[in-house]
Image (cartoon, rainbow, N blue to C red):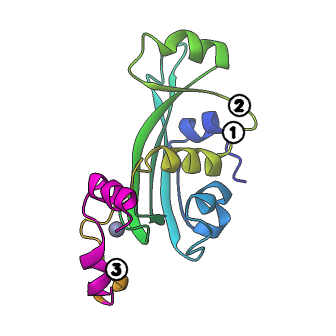
Amino acid sequence: MRRLDVKAFAEEGAELAGRDSLGAHFRLMSETGGRAPESVVDWSARGELRNPHHVHPEVWLHLQAQAALSLVCQRCLAPVEVPVRVDRSFRFVSDEETAAALDDQSEEDLLALSAAFDLGELIEDELLMELPVAPRHEVCPVPVVLAVADPEFEATEPSNPFELLRKLKTGK
Ligand SMILES: [Zn+2]
């Protein structure tokens, strides 16, 4: 938990940075299947007040985060380390309704100011959103099983389903 008063943070133009262990991020850990809890999540956040002399100055939070996550390669099913990066800015508006109302017409990423705002949770949300749908090795490590496969078995394996069907029918 890392509660942050975003408005005050922006007014001060404050900055925060940290390095968490992946193990502290429960939802990211469930993506890695519990692997490498000691790997790190690096992050930094900066507050900014835009138009400070305006009646309603804009409250901004700039977030950067990065981690290397051990995911499962969708081709060979072995673990693959995937670097994930977030570099995003959020404008905070007074409440959820305003955020929802402005969301359609705005290119900006809008969030509602909330006393319960948790920076750690936002970092985790954003990293989760950057996860690839189908993580893969660029080049999969050659599975050892291929090297010791029985060549006779390979040779007798029917090469197509029709062949297999014919063999079944004729009993050969
Ligand atoms: Zn792979």
Q: Distance between the residues labelled 3 and 2?
A: 50 Å
Determine whether 78 is above or below 159 in the image. below
Q: Does 94 sit left or right of 164 as displayed?
A: right
Q: Which quadrant of the picture is home to ligand 1?
A: bottom left
Number of numbered discs overlaid on the protein picture: 3
Q: Mark 1 points at which residue?
A: 117
Asked whether 49 falls inside the magenta stretch, the response is no
> In the rendered structure, are the residues bearing label 3 and label 1 in contact, judged by CB atoms less than 8 Å apart?
no
Q: Residue furthest bottom?
A: 148
Whether residue 95 is visible to the viewer of this picture, yes or no, is: no
Q: Does 121 sit left or right of 56 as displayed?
A: right
**Residue in the picture at 58% in, 18% down:** 99
Q: Does 45 sit left or right of 154 as displayed?
A: right
At which x and y percent is residue 148? 33, 90
At which x and y percent is residue 115? 75, 34
**Residue in the picture at 28% in, 66% down:** 158
The reply to whether the residue tagged 3 has its Cβ within 8 angstroms of ligand 1 is no
> In the rendered structure, are the residues bearing label 1 and label 2 in contact, judged by CB atoms less than 8 Å apart?
yes
Q: Distance between the residues labelled 1 and 2?
A: 5 Å
Q: What element carries label 2?
A: loop
Labelled disc at residue 114:
2
Q: Name the residue under label 3.
A: 143
Region of the chain picked out in magenta, as a range: 148-172
Q: Earlier in the sequence, mark 3 or mark 2?
A: 2
Q: Distance between the residues labelled 3 and 1?
A: 46 Å
The reply to whether the residue tagged 2 has its Cβ within 8 angstroms of ligand 1 is no
Q: What residue type is labelled 3?
A: Pro
At which x and y percent is residue 172? 34, 68
Q: Which of marks 3 and 1 is nearer the N terminus?
A: 1
Classified by dominant secondary structure, the portion drawn in magenta counts as: helix
**Residue in the picture at 67% in, 40% down:** 5
Q: What residue type is labelled 1?
A: Phe
